[in-house]
Image (spheres, grey):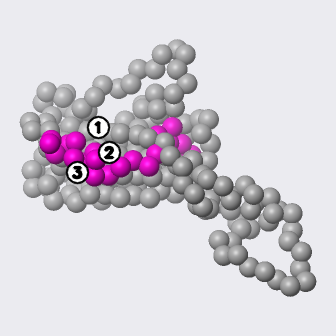
Amino acid sequence: MNKTIRGYLLFPLLGVLSSLVACSGAEVLPGPTDLLVATGYSQYGWRSEPLSPTAYSKDKLYQADPAIRSAIEERMKELGYSLVSKAEAEFLIDYVAAAGVNEGLLESTSSNVTPYPTATIGRQIDGASVDNAYALGGAKQTGNLMIVFLDNATTDLLWQVRVSSLIQDANKVDEGAVRKTIRQGLSTLPEAP
């Protein structure tokens, strides 16, 4: 079985990148960078062409694709990697996105909610706490993005990172949040040789 396929299977995705849309924080699960560093590669290309949305598409992934690619390219340039054509690239970058749900997560922006239940005798709960308990008590939509680096000659997996985040507004793509989350995801990537 191809190492690339095994890499995709080893890190099951929790959730789409309509994803990385206005997130309050991100969980980053990077793979080891040993293989990428050992190659000494510094020129990359995109494995797949950019998604081209149709006029009637409401798929958030098609709307987020330009922001995702731009954020990755920006960070790679800062690290000293050069974007070249797919034919000239030493390694290729691609991403996989999926949507999911995570039970019991609290938003980091909730100021008057505590994750630890308490009871105070003789005191009534205020209405805001009750409302927040209802709002934050259910399942939360998450977005996950796995970024993979593949050897262009062999398609072997060189490096990968999975970024998972809560989605606050699934109706729009927040490019600033996408950029911030991708920067977090690529934070363990070493500089180009």
Whether 44 is drawn above or below 109: the answer is above
The answer to whether residue 65 shows anywhere in this view is yes
Q: Give the alpha-carbon distance from disc 3 to disc 2, as whole Å.
A: 8 Å
Name which residue lies at 20% across and 43% down: 4
Decide which of 109, 95 is in the foreground and name it: 95
- Residue 147 is tagged as 2
At which x and y percent is residue 139?
A: 61, 53
Residue 82 appears anywhere in the view: no
Q: Amino acid at mark 2?
A: Ile
Asked which secondary structure carries label 2, the reply is strand
**Viewer-nearest residue: 56 or 120:** 120
Q: Residues within 10 Å of mark 3 (few under 14, many from 20)?
A: many
In this picture, which residue range is highlighted in magenta? 1-23
Q: Which mark is residue 158?
A: none
| Residue 94, label in figure | 1
Question: Mark 1: which secondary structure?
Answer: strand
Query: Is residue 15 rendered magenta in the image?
Result: yes
32 left or right, relative to 117 = left
| 108 on left or right of 184 | right
Q: Are marks 3 and 2 in contact (CB under 8 Å)?
A: no
Image quarter (top left, top right, bottom left or bottom right) of the N terminus: top left
* The residue positioned farthest toward the top in the image shown: 55
Disc 3/disc 1 C-alpha distance (Å): 11 Å
Nearest the eye: 36 or 73: 36
Q: Earlier in the sequence, mark 1 or mark 2?
A: 1
Q: Position of residue 117 (x, y in %)?
A: 70, 75
- Residue that label 3 marks: 159
| 124 left or right of 18 in image | right
Residue 134: x and y in percent read 75, 57
- Crowd rating for badge 1 (residues with CA inside 10 Å; few <14, some 14–19, many 20+): some
Tell me the amino acid under the disc marked 3.
Answer: Trp
Q: Are marks 3 and 1 in contact (CB under 8 Å)?
A: no
